Image (cartoon, rainbow, N blue to C red):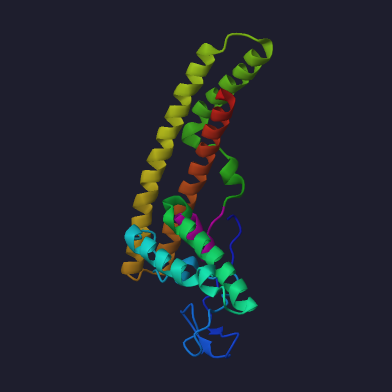
Amino acid sequence: MSEPFTVTNAPLVCWNCHERTIGTHFCPGCGKVLQVPEHTDYFFMLGLPRRLWLDMGTLEQKFLELSWKLHPDNFVNATTEEREISLTRSSELNDAYRTLRGPVSRVEYLLAIEGTRKEGKTKQQAPPELLEEVFGLNESLDELREAKAAGSDVGALRQRLGTAEQGFKQKMKEIDDELQLAARKWDQTLDANADEGAKKRVMSQLNDLLNRRSYIRNLVVNVQKELL
C-alpha cells in the first residue's frame, strides 16, 4: 500500500431501477443488490467508523450478517447480472474483513485511504538504534552461508542466529505495542475533533512505526530462511 488511492463513498445509482441511494447494499426501491464502485472504503462497507480501535465482536457480527445477505447461494435463481454482483460483493466483503480484522493491516489501510502511507527508501533503511545489531546479523548470515557451502559445522552459528531472531521478534512486539498506543491517539484526535495538523502528526508517527516494523520483519524472515 505504498501509493495512496481515492476511496469512493459516493451516492449509488441502482442498475435496475436507477434510483439514487447511499450507504446501503441493496436498493431501497426495488431490493436488488447494488454494484459498488471500485475503491469503496472498507470501513464504510461494513458500516463502521474510520477508527483504529474497533470492537472485534461488532466487526465479526456485521461481516457475518452481510456475508449471509450477499452470499451467492441467495442468488441462484436471480439474473446473471445479480449473480455476478453477489460474487463480486462477497469477495470485496472478505477482503474488507481480513484487512480490518488485523491491527497492523488496519493501520496500513487507514493510512492508505488517508493518503499518508509512505514507504519508499525508509522501509529499506535500518532504524538508527539497530544499526550495530543489523550489521552483526548480516555478518552472521554471511558466515552461515559460507560454512554451509564449505560443509563446516554450523551449530554455533545457528544458535547465534536463533538468539538474534528472538531478539528481533521482541523488538517487533515492542513496536506493535507502540502502534496500539499511537492508534489510540488517532481515535482520540477524532473524538476531540482535532485539527488536520494533529491528525497528520499521528499519521506520521504511525507511518514511521510501520516502516520500522516492516524492516525488522524482513530481518526475521531472512534469518528464518537461512535456518531452514
Q: Is residue 68 above or below residue 158?
A: below
| Residue occupying the point 48% across, 57% down | 99
Residue reaching furthest right?
Answer: 149
| Residue occupying the point 51% across, 12% down | 156
Which image quadrant is residue 49 in?
A: bottom left
Magenta residue span: 106-118
Q: Quadrant of the C terminus?
A: top right
Viewer can see residue 206 = yes
Q: What kind of secondary structure does the magenta stretch mostly adopt?
A: helix
Instruction: Between residue 106 and residue 84, name the one nearer to us.
Output: 84
Please state the horizontal and vertical placement of residue 4, each as a whole percent of the image.
58, 62
Please state the horizontal and vertical placement of residue 44, each as a whole percent of the image.
46, 71
Please state the horizontal and vertical placement of residue 11, each as a whole percent of the image.
53, 83
**Position of residue 110 in the picture relative to residue 59 (left or right):** right
Residue reaching furthest top?
Answer: 152
Residue 190 highlighted magenta (yes or no): no
Q: Quadrant of the N terminus?
A: bottom right
Please state the horizontal and vertical placement of residue 121, each as a whole percent of the image.
61, 46
